[in-house]
Amino acid sequence: MPPFDLTRRTLLTGTAVTAAAATLGGLPRPVFAQAASSLNYGISMTDVPLTTGQPDRGAGAYQFTGLTIYDPLVAWELDVADRPGKMIPGLATSWEADPADRKNWIFKLREGVKFHDGSPFNADAVIWNLEKVMNTQAPQFDARQAAQVKPRLPSLASYKKLDDMTVQITAKGVDALFPYQMMWFLISSPTQYQKVGGDWAKFAMAPSGTGPFKMGELVPRVRVELLKNPDYWDKKRLAKVDKLTLTCIPEDLSRASALLSNQVDLIESPAPDSVSRLKQAGMRLSTNVVPHVWNYHLSMVEGSPWRDVRLRRAANLAIDRDAVVELMNGLAVPAVGQVPQSSPWFGNPSFKIRYDMDAARKLVSEAGYSKDKPLKVKFIVPTGGTGQMLSMPMNEFVQQSWAEVGIALELQPVEQEVAYTAWRKGAADPSLAGISGSNVAYVTSDPFYAIVRFYSSKQIAPVGVNWSHYKNAEVDALCDQINATFDPAEQDKLLAKVHEKVVDDAVQVWVVHDVYPHALSSKVKTYTQAQHWFQDLTTLS
Amino acid sequence: MIFYIVRRVLYSIPIALSVGLVCFLLVYISPGDPISAIAPPDAPAEMITQLRRDYGLDKPLPEQFAIWLGRVVQGDLGRSLSTGRPVWGEVSVALKNTVSLAVAACTLAFAIGTLLGGLAAAFRDTWVDRIAMTFAVAGVSVPHYWLGMLLVAVFAVTFPLAPSMGAGPGGTFVWDWAHLPFLILPMVTLSAIPLGLVARTVRGTVIEILHQEFITTLRGKGLRSGGILLHVAKNAAPSVLAVMGLQLGYLMGGSILVETVFSWPGTGFLLNSAIFQRDIPLLQGTILVLALLFVALNLVVDLGQALLDPRIKR
């Protein structure tokens, strides 16, 4: 006899009580619906980027808490999708290098602009903001913001106010690319800083800029609300939604699930394998070519096998980029150079990067290697992370392709931060002994970020990020010329010449460009996706 | 009993200190530069050196540990490298969310696990036993992040019955009707492992007790099932309590995977973020608080066991 009496009646009663508790208890159905003029955007960041002015978490964060709450002096044109955007006036209406001394840049400031707190924008505000990030002795100096923007202002030497609406910023040398650097520099309100007691931590919770959105509630690591600024100075760029909530959902599948269950209205960077499911559920996919490249930097330090251009070219020829795009479920475009072919800086390289295994085998054989006697190399690769796309599957794809032509690639997978640390150190660093390649994908948004920092020998790591230690006198001369050329069209031509040269030299192995996919529910009526890593969230409606 | 409590509390002090040392050193063993939490990837060497100096990361490790310990003893866990916010503020908010989730998951696991284990023991070697143990084994065996994704796919996407992410309005969990739906899926996911363990423990313990002579005596004296159940429960409680205490401790540590899958803003989510950003103060502070919590919880469980079974005190 069992020690307890379990009858059918007991079981049924128990079940009924449990069911009643669960249903009659009245657990409310989750309320996901948003007000008509609000959107909830699932972003891939683990935390809301810094809200004090200069966002942290990389270039991708500028679109979230940078260009929404704040404005730069010089802006990107982000409301066009069919061509790369240009430099346009932001809080400065014009800028020019002083003909008397080309190192001095004169910025004329926009009249009538007010910060969200009502205080006026003027030259004092610009100087105060420059002090905020450049002068460690200034009371408003903020090491956190300085760390974000100072590396992006490498040419800035000094600054002064000329009158209430004019500032002069002096570069370290003649640098025609200087205005591009100013696009990273955003202006916060000095008055609001004083109002919150001169405390950047408090300012972060109640920020004030001149941007198209004011900040609403901020829940660290969870979400931030951006509220339309109806008094925004650029009426063409008024926000189309009253409230835009940015919700941090770092996990790819969770982001897709949140969209599918209507908890958010759009997401960035859906996982490639979730694309078909999202489309089936009626979501729209928005993509565009962006200045970003997934590539390998090859070491050219003494003793590296990659000093042989034949091997560098073979490595480029032995990759079926269309197959990589297929692996990415279409969320990439083949890269046959540092910048997309639509870029004015692409030029016309004589080395045409294509998929040609026979040509690759021939070059490897000429260099003294074969499938039976392979060239053995080891690359440091990130396991994943922002901008790294499907890092490991893509690396393994390349590894298999290269094995076919006689290049035995050993992968050393590390976390993204470790890969960045190695990237900053450069190929000659003793900690990277035995490593002859680095796989860090990055933004190539402006001439310095796309070209100069990688190919000028003045930028050899750890000074800059010329990881490879690439030195080419002709390229160096062209880079110097670019810095001294103030005509944008002429500048483009010189950049194209550098690009042609580095493609011909096969300085890197270029694989794909990102298309920065977004998945949008039917609630999102309009969204202009620029050919840029930054996006203009005011175009969302 | 007082002597026992004092002895157990004293044992906890060296454990807490060791935990402090280990969690300080652990984060330095892993590769990567903590300055990555602050500087962009392409920051020049000169700036990296300056930042390292500003944040005291250029000092020798023992000196850094002494400074850190000195602050921790005064209750200051420092500021997050990445956000600049006080670590204690970050940890306390996350801990509140994780504790809510852990308590809910443990309560569910304890209720269902005890029920399943009790039924399996009472109906040993029958279909009831087999079904109950199938659930228990499945609970222990299924990877919980996978179960989480499955639950999201079924109950949030296909049949939108519960939200798939977040802790509800306001971003922080509070015990009210508006937030409860957000608890359901992570709670069910997290309860799977403790549920299985409790069910198996209860079954094994109850079977063992049911075969003891005093049960035969009780039955021989004519005690009914209800009365026998009380005796069985009291004798099984210390073992089950020990398992539940440990499980609650594990769950309070936060599950990095489950909290990431559900974007639940708890300590697991916080640790995930701190690890990937190399945010050393945040990592050290979070691990320390969790480890101390675990030590405290073990202490409470030990004392609870001693109360239930006086033999343990000896």
Image: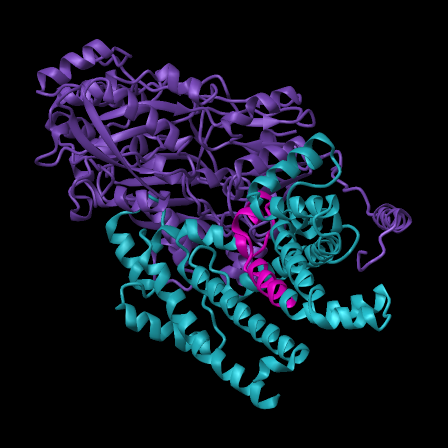
Quadrant where the N terminus of chain A lies? bottom right
Choose top left, top right, bottom left or bottom right for residue B206.
bottom right
| Rendered location of residue A417, percent (x, y) | 35, 46
| Rendered location of residue B171, percent (x, y) | 65, 51
Front in this rendered view, residue A349 or A213 = A349
Front in this rendered view, residue B74 or B243 = B243
Q: Is residue B86 visible?
A: no
Quadrant where the C terminus of chain A lies? top right
Q: Which residue occupies the extreme bottom position in the image?
A: B3
Residue at 53% x, 54% y: name it.
B268
Residue at 32% x, 51% y: name it.
B32
Side of A517 where B119 appears, left or right: right
Choose top left, top right, bottom left or bottom right for residue B78.
bottom left
Q: What segment is highlighted magenta in the picture? A: B241-269
Q: Which residue occupies the extreme front position in the image?
A: B220
| Rendered location of residue B244, percent (x, y) | 63, 63
Side of B225 where A348 appears, left or right: left
Q: Is residue A221 visible?
A: yes
The colour with which the image depicts chain A is purple
The answer to whether B312 is drawn above or below residue B236 in the figure is below
Front in this rendered view, residue B247 or A219 = B247
Choose top left, top right, bottom left or bottom right for residue A247.
top right
| Rendered location of residue A394, percent (x, y) | 36, 27
